């Protein structure tokens, strides 16, 4: 079976399982999405969704966020990992959004990645889920499954992203990266029981 054929099977099966995919992080606009994604590094989406309602009540836009002290932001996000660094980044990010972009979240990778605490993956999520621009954010689930399905020999997420973009049609990217994440969580957790990972079995058990 060629890589392309395996990719076709993966797309077909994921489409059957997850015909519609909700965005896992609760948000109401590009700014709250940007904040939620930045907060989700090394923390579960579930945890982020638990703390953001209070945060957004107080600072749901860049103007309000920049006026908070770092300690105030830290207090609001204290239950998640790396709260110190994230609080500093959020304040500076809000300041720069106001200074450089009139308080509006920019719609280019370059401008997003120039903001503190925003790496390529965060920018990709905001571009795809916030603005509908085709992007393929690769997290650890996707990197692991793409490797497991032998769709990449990527040593890192950068290579995996390149391979994914070559293999899968552009119009599927925004939905597909979420489908893979949901599949990973439900059927093939990083630690624990892989018995239910039927896609891997389909691809290699014959």
Image (tube, rainbow, N blue to C red):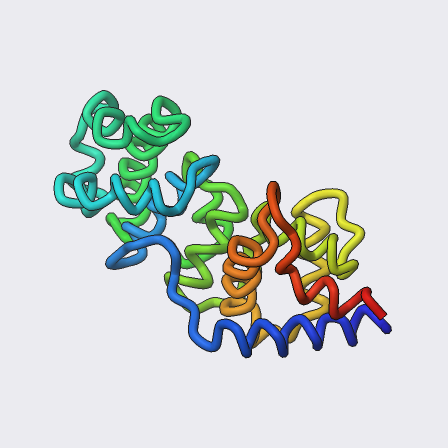
Residue 7 in the image: above or below residue 109: below
Residue positioned 26% across, 25% down in the render:
74
x and y percentages locating residue 6 in the rendered image: 76, 71
Say which quadrant the C terminus sits in: bottom right
Q: Give the quarter of the image for residue 188.
A: bottom right
Residue positioned 47% across, 67% down in the render:
133
User: Foreground residue, 77 or 109?
Assistant: 77
Residue 45 in the image: above or below residue 43: below
User: Foreground residue, 81 or 56?
Assistant: 81
* Residue 11 seen in render: yes
Left or right: residue 185 versus residue 161 is: left
User: Foreground residue, 49 or 27?
Assistant: 49
Residue positioned 72% across, 69% down in the render:
167
Left or right: residue 174 versus residue 5 is: left
Say which quadrant the N terminus sits in: bottom right
Left or right: residue 197 versus residue 50 is: right
Q: Give the quarter of the image for residue 88.
A: top left
x and y percentages locating residue 5 in the rendered image: 78, 76
x and y percentages locating residue 27 in the rendered image: 28, 55
* Residue 105 seen in render: no
């Amino acid at each position: 079976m060629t890589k392309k054929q395996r990719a076709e099977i993966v797309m077909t099966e994921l489409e059957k399982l997850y015909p519609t995919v909700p965005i896992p992080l609760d948000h109401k606009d590009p700014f709250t999405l940007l904040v939620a994604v930045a907060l989700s590094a090394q923390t579960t989406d579930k945890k982020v969704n638990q703390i953001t309602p209070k945060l957004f009540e107080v600072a749901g836009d860049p103007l309000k966020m920049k006026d908070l002290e770092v300690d105030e932001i830290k207090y609001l996000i204290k239950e998640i990992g790396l709260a110190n660094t994230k609080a500093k980044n959020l304040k500076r990010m809000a300041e720069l959004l106001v200074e450089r972009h009139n308080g509006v979240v920019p719609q280019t990778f370059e401008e997003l990645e120039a903001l503190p605490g925003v790496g390529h993956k965060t920018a990709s999520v905001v571009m795809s889920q916030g603005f509908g621009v085709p992007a393929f954010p690769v997290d650890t689930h996707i990197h692991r499954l793409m490797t497991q399905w032998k769709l990449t020999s990527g040593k890192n997420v950068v290579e995996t992203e390149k391979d994914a973009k070559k293999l899968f049609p552009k119009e599927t990217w925004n939905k597909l990266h979420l489908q893979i994440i949901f599949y990973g969580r439900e059927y093939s957790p990083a630690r624990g029981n892989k018995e239910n990972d039927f896609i891997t079995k389909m691809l290699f058990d014959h």
